[in-house]
């Protein structure tokens, strides 16, 4: 199966992805994000949607490693598969942040634990 690659990246990623990276990730594999664990974890969901042809909706809690500190986020996402005229499968993402002042109090260790559990289950 082909590895998922970025074809477009919107402004919604500006809160965790360095602005210089926005240009550099186009054409790159999703697993090659600066945080390799997060990229690999997310890549598995795109591959699953592409191979099954079924949409996927999730609530996500993630701790994304970046400098100078870990970015902790909660969001809901919808992954939709589309078949192109060349039989390639394009997966689009819609996401909406679920952050609130209460979420900001979440500790990185709690979130990292959740991400590791989800990552292990998706392998």
Image (cartoon, helix red, strand yellow):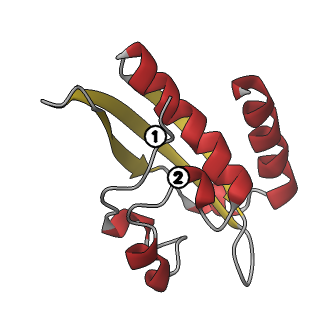
- Residue 69 % position (x, y): 75, 77
User: Upstream in the sequence, badge 2 or badge 1?
Assistant: 2
SS for tag 2?
Answer: helix
Q: Residue at x 85, y 43 (%)?
A: 113
- Residue 80 % position (x, y): 31, 30
Q: In front here: 28 or 12?
A: 28
Q: Callout 1 environment at 10 Å: few (<14), some (14 to 19), or many (20+)?
A: some
Q: Residue at x 68, y 62 (%)?
A: 35
SS for tag 1?
Answer: strand
Give the labeled residue for mark 1. Answer: 76
Side (left or right) of 90 relative to 22: left
Quarter that holds the C terminus: top right
Query: Which tag is nearer the camera, tag 2 or tag 1?
Result: 2
Side (left or right) of 23 relative to 29: left
Side (left or right) of 33 relative to 37: left
- Residue 89 badge: none
Q: Is residue 16 above or below residue 52?
A: below
Give the labeled residue for mark 2. Answer: 30
């Amino acid at each position: 199966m082909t590895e998922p690659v970025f074809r477009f990246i919107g402004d919604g990623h500006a809160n965790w992805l360095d602005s210089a990276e926005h240009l550099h990730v186009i054409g790159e594999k999703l697993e090659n994000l600066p945080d390799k664990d997060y990229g690999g974890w997310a890549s598995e969901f795109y591959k699953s949607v592409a191979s099954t042809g079924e949409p996927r909706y999730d609530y996500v809690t993630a701790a994304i490693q970046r400098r100078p500190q870990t970015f902790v986020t909660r969001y809901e996402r919808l992954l939709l598969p589309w078949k192109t005229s060349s039989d390639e499968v394009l997966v689009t993402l819609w996401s909406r942040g679920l952050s609130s002042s209460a979420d900001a109090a979440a500790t990185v260790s709690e979130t990292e634990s959740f991400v590791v559990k989800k990552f292990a289950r998706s392998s």
